């Protein structure tokens, strides 16, 4: 039986994200309950609302999602149907830290998946839950948010993030320089 430790689950760099469809989970070969707990712990530590197995280097059709105490483990999912109505919303991803892009997705979906006990679940998700499910499901299909937007939109988001990081560095550097200057003035005044 495959045992996975939380310390082994490291985010795969964006340029190494798998581009293939993840393999179906065989419940006879894994401890699904243990894997669920480890994945939920890592998701929480990373500040995410979902974490898929391919994001942490596991070739498994599995993800966890949840906000606060509402947690869901998803094994071997399929999206049965999508609503015709779609909406645009900012999405981020643990795969691309700090990036936000506007992605169009169906407002509601009907899904089937197995829980950690190997029991078939059928649900309809709407709104944010539907979006989170679709985003995590994309990772199982070898797709990321970068694939969901045009190159122009991606480049603009990359530039925004770069500018933001430069402003933070400048602000931090200026504060540190002021702290050093004050410390030097205090030292010179005390000699």
Image (cartoon, rainbow, N blue to C red):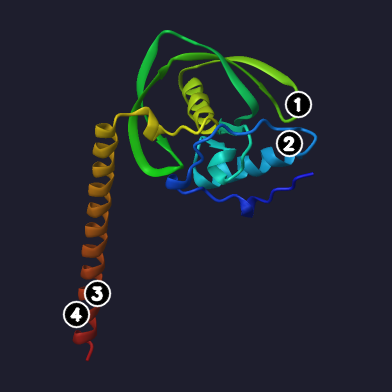
Q: Which residue is mark 3?
A: 180
Q: In the rendered view of the protein, which quadrant contains the N terminus? A: top right
Pointer 2 or 1: first along the chain: 2
Of badges 4 and 2, the one in the foreground is 2
Mark linked to residue 32: 2
Q: Quadrant of the C terminus?
A: bottom left
Q: Residue at x 51, y 46 (%)?
A: 46
Is the Cβ of the residue at disc 2 closer than 8 Å to that at disc 3?
A: no
Q: Nearer the viewer, mark 3 or mark 1?
A: 1
Q: Residue furthest top?
A: 84
From the image, tell me which residue sits under label 1: 118
| CA distance separating discs 2 and 1 | 8 Å
- Give above or below for 8 relative to 18: below
Q: Along the horizontal axis of the image, is 182 left or right of 142?
A: left
Q: Quadrant of residue 60?
A: top right
* Cα distance in 3D space between marks 4 and 3: 9 Å
Which residue is identified by label 4? Answer: 185
Nearer to the camera, 3 or 42: 3
- Specify which label sits upstream in the sequence, 3 or 1: 1
Q: Earlier in the sequence, mark 4 or mark 2?
A: 2
């Amino acid at each position: 039986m495959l045992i996975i430790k939380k310390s082994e689950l490291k985010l795969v760099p964006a340029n190494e994200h798998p581009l293939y469809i993840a393999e179906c989970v065989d419940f006879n070969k894994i401890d699904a309950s243990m894997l669920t707990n480890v994945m939920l712990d890592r998701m929480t530590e990373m500040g995410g609302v979902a974490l898929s197995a391919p994001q942490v280097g596991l070739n498994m059709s599995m993800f966890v999602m949840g906000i606060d105490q509402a947690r869901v483990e998803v094994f071997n999912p399929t999206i049965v149907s999508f609503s015709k109505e779609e909406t645009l919303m900012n999405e981020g991803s643990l795969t691309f830290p700090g990036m936000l892009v506007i992605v169009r997705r169906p407002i509601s979906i009907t899904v089937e998946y197995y829980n950690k006990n190997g029991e078939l679940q059928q649900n309809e998700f709407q709104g944010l839950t539907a979006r989170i499910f679709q985003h995590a499901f994309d990772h199982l299909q070898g797709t990321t948010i970068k694939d969901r937007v045009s190159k122009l939109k991606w480049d603009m988001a990359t530039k925004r993030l770069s500018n933001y990081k430069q402003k933070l560095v400048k602000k931090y550097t200026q504060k540190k320089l002021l702290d050093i200057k004050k410390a030097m003035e205090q030292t010179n005044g005390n000699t």
